[in-house]
Protein backbone atom coordinates (compact mmCIF):
# COMPACT_ATOMS: atom_id res chain seq x y z
CA UNK A 1 0.00 0.00 0.00
CA UNK A 2 1.23 3.44 -0.87
CA UNK A 3 1.00 5.74 2.15
CA UNK A 4 2.35 8.80 0.34
CA UNK A 5 0.32 11.60 -1.10
CA UNK A 6 0.16 10.06 -4.57
CA UNK A 7 0.09 13.51 -6.16
CA UNK A 8 0.42 12.11 -9.67
CA UNK A 9 -3.08 10.58 -9.39
CA UNK A 10 -4.84 13.75 -8.19
CA UNK A 11 -6.24 16.34 -10.56
CA UNK A 12 -5.36 19.28 -8.30
CA UNK A 13 -3.80 18.71 -4.87
CA UNK A 14 -4.47 22.33 -3.79
CA UNK A 15 -8.29 22.19 -3.79
CA UNK A 16 -10.68 20.62 -1.32
CA UNK A 17 -12.39 18.18 -3.70
CA UNK A 18 -9.92 16.88 -6.30
CA UNK A 19 -10.48 13.78 -8.39
CA UNK A 20 -8.36 10.76 -7.51
CA UNK A 21 -7.08 8.24 -10.08
CA UNK A 22 -4.87 5.78 -8.18
CA UNK A 23 -3.61 2.64 -9.91
CA UNK A 24 -3.52 0.77 -6.60
CA UNK A 25 -5.02 1.12 -3.14
CA UNK A 26 -3.62 4.37 -1.75
CA UNK A 27 -3.74 6.35 1.49
CA UNK A 28 -4.09 10.09 0.85
CA UNK A 29 -3.35 12.78 3.45
CA UNK A 30 -4.71 16.30 3.28
CA UNK A 31 -3.01 19.22 5.06
CA UNK A 32 -5.17 22.25 5.87
CA UNK A 33 -3.58 25.52 7.08
CA UNK A 34 -5.80 28.27 8.45
CA UNK A 35 -5.24 32.03 8.54
CA UNK A 36 -3.36 31.73 11.81
CA UNK A 37 -0.84 29.37 10.31
CA UNK A 38 -2.18 26.36 12.17
CA UNK A 39 -2.19 23.10 10.24
CA UNK A 40 -4.50 20.13 10.58
CA UNK A 41 -4.41 16.81 8.71
CA UNK A 42 -6.82 14.14 7.59
CA UNK A 43 -6.36 10.81 5.86
CA UNK A 44 -8.51 8.81 3.46
CA UNK A 45 -7.85 5.42 1.92
CA UNK A 46 -9.01 4.87 -1.65
CA UNK A 47 -9.37 1.15 -2.32
CA UNK A 48 -8.70 0.09 -5.90
CA UNK A 49 -10.44 -3.13 -6.91
CA UNK A 50 -9.18 -5.18 -9.84
CA UNK A 51 -11.43 -5.48 -12.88
CA UNK A 52 -13.15 -8.86 -13.21
CA UNK A 53 -11.66 -11.33 -15.66
CA UNK A 54 -14.11 -12.03 -18.48
CA UNK A 55 -14.08 -14.52 -21.33
CA UNK A 56 -16.77 -14.48 -24.02
CA UNK A 57 -15.35 -17.68 -25.52
CA UNK A 58 -13.78 -18.50 -28.85
CA UNK A 59 -15.33 -17.39 -32.14
CA UNK A 60 -17.53 -20.09 -33.62
CA UNK A 61 -19.46 -20.87 -36.82
CA UNK A 62 -22.98 -22.29 -37.10
CA UNK A 63 -25.19 -23.45 -39.95
CA UNK A 64 -28.61 -21.97 -40.62
CA UNK A 65 -31.12 -23.35 -38.12
CA UNK A 66 -28.45 -24.54 -35.70
CA UNK A 67 -27.40 -23.04 -32.38
CA UNK A 68 -24.37 -23.02 -30.13
CA UNK A 69 -23.43 -22.12 -26.56
CA UNK A 70 -21.22 -19.07 -26.12
CA UNK A 71 -19.18 -17.81 -23.18
CA UNK A 72 -15.87 -19.15 -21.98
CA UNK A 73 -15.08 -20.83 -18.68
CA UNK A 74 -14.59 -19.20 -16.30
CA UNK A 75 -16.41 -16.11 -17.57
CA UNK A 76 -16.21 -14.05 -14.40
CA UNK A 77 -15.54 -14.12 -10.64
CA UNK A 78 -17.95 -15.74 -8.20
CA UNK A 79 -20.97 -13.51 -7.61
CA UNK A 80 -20.66 -11.68 -10.93
CA UNK A 81 -23.62 -10.72 -13.08
CA UNK A 82 -23.69 -10.98 -16.87
CA UNK A 83 -25.32 -8.90 -19.56
CA UNK A 84 -25.10 -9.98 -23.23
CA UNK A 85 -25.93 -7.83 -26.25
CA UNK A 86 -27.38 -7.65 -28.81
CA UNK A 87 -30.33 -9.78 -27.70
CA UNK A 88 -31.09 -11.04 -31.23
CA UNK A 89 -30.69 -14.80 -31.45
CA UNK A 90 -29.79 -15.23 -27.77
CA UNK A 91 -31.54 -17.29 -25.12
CA UNK A 92 -31.10 -15.84 -21.62
CA UNK A 93 -28.97 -12.69 -21.91
CA UNK A 94 -28.04 -12.83 -18.21
CA UNK A 95 -26.57 -16.35 -18.31
CA UNK A 96 -22.82 -16.84 -18.22
CA UNK A 97 -23.14 -19.27 -21.16
CA UNK A 98 -26.29 -18.48 -23.15
CA UNK A 99 -27.51 -20.34 -26.23
CA UNK A 100 -27.04 -18.43 -29.49
CA UNK A 101 -28.89 -19.04 -32.76
CA UNK A 102 -28.38 -15.93 -34.88
CA UNK A 103 -29.98 -15.37 -38.29
CA UNK A 104 -26.84 -13.60 -39.53
CA UNK A 105 -23.20 -13.33 -38.52
CA UNK A 106 -23.26 -11.53 -35.16
CA UNK A 107 -20.69 -10.27 -32.66
CA UNK A 108 -21.99 -10.64 -29.12
CA UNK A 109 -20.59 -8.61 -26.21
CA UNK A 110 -20.79 -9.67 -22.57
CA UNK A 111 -20.39 -7.16 -19.75
CA UNK A 112 -19.45 -8.70 -16.40
CA UNK A 113 -20.13 -6.80 -13.19
CA UNK A 114 -18.54 -8.17 -10.02
CA UNK A 115 -19.53 -7.76 -6.38
CA UNK A 116 -17.53 -4.52 -6.21
CA UNK A 117 -19.57 -3.09 -9.13
CA UNK A 118 -16.47 -3.15 -11.30
CA UNK A 119 -17.21 -3.93 -14.94
CA UNK A 120 -15.32 -5.28 -17.91
CA UNK A 121 -16.34 -6.67 -21.31
CA UNK A 122 -15.36 -9.16 -24.00
CA UNK A 123 -16.91 -10.23 -27.28
CA UNK A 124 -17.32 -13.31 -29.46
CA UNK A 125 -18.34 -13.59 -33.12
CA UNK A 126 -20.81 -16.26 -34.22
CA UNK A 127 -20.46 -16.73 -37.98
CA UNK A 128 -23.70 -17.77 -39.70
CA UNK A 129 -23.45 -20.03 -42.76
CA UNK A 130 -26.31 -20.74 -45.15
CA UNK A 131 -27.25 -24.34 -45.94
CA UNK A 132 -25.92 -25.61 -49.26
CA UNK A 133 -28.31 -25.55 -52.23
CA UNK A 134 -29.21 -29.07 -53.36
CA UNK A 135 -31.65 -30.73 -55.72
CA UNK A 136 -32.18 -34.46 -56.00
CA UNK A 137 -33.64 -33.97 -59.46
CA UNK A 138 -37.17 -34.61 -60.75
CA UNK A 139 -39.16 -37.70 -59.82
CA UNK A 140 -38.64 -40.44 -62.36
CA UNK A 141 -39.66 -43.99 -63.28
CA UNK A 142 -38.49 -47.10 -65.14
CA UNK A 143 -39.76 -50.57 -65.92
CA UNK A 144 -39.06 -53.49 -63.60
CA UNK A 145 -35.72 -55.04 -64.49
CA UNK A 146 -34.40 -51.79 -65.91
CA UNK A 147 -32.64 -48.82 -64.34
CA UNK A 148 -32.46 -45.05 -64.36
CA UNK A 149 -29.71 -42.56 -63.66
CA UNK A 150 -30.35 -40.05 -60.91
CA UNK A 151 -28.84 -36.58 -61.11
CA UNK A 152 -28.45 -34.49 -57.95
CA UNK A 153 -26.99 -31.00 -58.21
CA UNK A 154 -25.00 -29.03 -55.66
CA UNK A 155 -21.43 -28.45 -54.47
CA UNK A 156 -20.03 -30.71 -51.77
CA UNK A 157 -20.09 -34.31 -50.61
CA UNK A 158 -23.15 -36.42 -51.51
CA UNK A 159 -24.61 -39.27 -49.48
CA UNK A 160 -27.62 -41.23 -50.76
CA UNK A 161 -29.98 -43.39 -48.72
CA UNK A 162 -31.30 -46.01 -48.62
CA UNK A 163 -28.66 -48.04 -50.43
CA UNK A 164 -31.18 -50.40 -52.07
CA UNK A 165 -30.64 -50.65 -55.82
CA UNK A 166 -28.03 -47.87 -56.03
CA UNK A 167 -24.74 -48.26 -57.90
CA UNK A 168 -23.07 -45.80 -55.48
CA UNK A 169 -24.12 -43.75 -52.47
CA UNK A 170 -21.38 -41.08 -52.70
CA UNK A 171 -21.71 -39.70 -56.24
CA UNK A 172 -24.22 -37.17 -57.47
CA UNK A 173 -25.51 -39.37 -60.34
CA UNK A 174 -25.82 -43.01 -59.27
CA UNK A 175 -27.71 -45.65 -61.25
CA UNK A 176 -30.92 -46.79 -59.55
CA UNK A 177 -32.21 -50.29 -60.28
CA UNK A 178 -34.51 -51.03 -57.36
CA UNK A 179 -37.15 -53.73 -57.67
CA UNK A 180 -39.93 -51.65 -56.05
CA UNK A 181 -40.97 -48.01 -56.00
CA UNK A 182 -38.69 -46.15 -53.61
CA UNK A 183 -37.93 -42.64 -52.35
CA UNK A 184 -34.24 -41.77 -52.19
CA UNK A 185 -32.83 -39.04 -49.97
CA UNK A 186 -29.58 -37.30 -50.90
CA UNK A 187 -27.65 -35.27 -48.33
CA UNK A 188 -25.05 -32.67 -49.26
CA UNK A 189 -22.28 -31.50 -46.93
CA UNK A 190 -20.46 -28.33 -47.99
CA UNK A 191 -17.07 -26.85 -47.08
CA UNK A 192 -18.55 -25.27 -43.92
CA UNK A 193 -19.84 -28.70 -42.76
CA UNK A 194 -23.39 -27.51 -43.28
CA UNK A 195 -25.81 -30.21 -44.43
CA UNK A 196 -28.94 -30.00 -46.55
CA UNK A 197 -30.99 -32.73 -48.22
CA UNK A 198 -33.63 -33.40 -50.86
CA UNK A 199 -35.69 -36.37 -52.01
CA UNK A 200 -36.55 -38.00 -55.31
CA UNK A 201 -39.28 -40.55 -55.98
CA UNK A 202 -38.35 -43.43 -58.27
CA UNK A 203 -41.39 -45.36 -59.51
CA UNK A 204 -40.79 -48.94 -60.67
CA UNK A 205 -43.47 -49.93 -63.19
CA UNK A 206 -44.44 -53.60 -63.42
CA UNK A 207 -44.15 -55.46 -66.72
CA UNK A 208 -47.32 -56.13 -68.69
CA UNK A 209 -48.69 -59.69 -68.77
CA UNK A 210 -48.12 -61.44 -72.07
CA UNK A 211 -50.24 -64.32 -73.29
Image: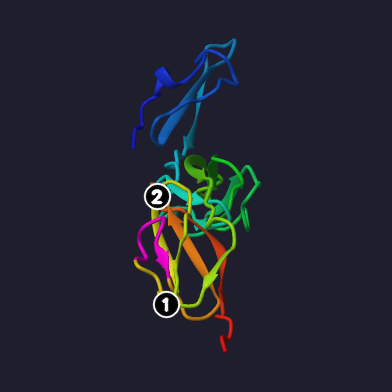
Q: Nearer the viewer, residue 192 or 209?
A: 209
Which residue matches tag 2? 156
Q: Residue at x 57, y 58 (%)?
A: 95
Up-down: is 14 above or below 194?
Answer: above
Q: Nearer the viewer, residue 159 or 74?
A: 159
Mark 2, secondary structure of its residue: loop
Is residue 51 in the magenta section?
no
Mostly what secondary structure, the magenta segment? loop
Q: Position of residue 108 (x, y in %)?
A: 54, 42
Which residue matches tag 1? 164
Visible residue check, residue 122: yes
Q: Residues within 10 Å of mark 1 (few under 14, many from 20)?
A: some
Report the magenta residues as a range: 168-176
- Quarter residue 176 falls in: bottom left
Return the mark for residue 14.
Answer: none
Q: Nearer the viewer, mark 2 or mark 1?
A: 1
Q: Nearer the viewer, residue 90 or 17?
A: 90
Q: Residue at x 44, y 38 (%)?
A: 48
Amino acid sequence: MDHGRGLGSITDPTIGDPLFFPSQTTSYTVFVTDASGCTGTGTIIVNVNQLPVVDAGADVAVCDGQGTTIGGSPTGPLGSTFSWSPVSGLGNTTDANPDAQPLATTTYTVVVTDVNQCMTADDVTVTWNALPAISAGPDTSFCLGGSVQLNATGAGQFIWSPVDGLSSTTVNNPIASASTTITYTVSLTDANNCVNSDEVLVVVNGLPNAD
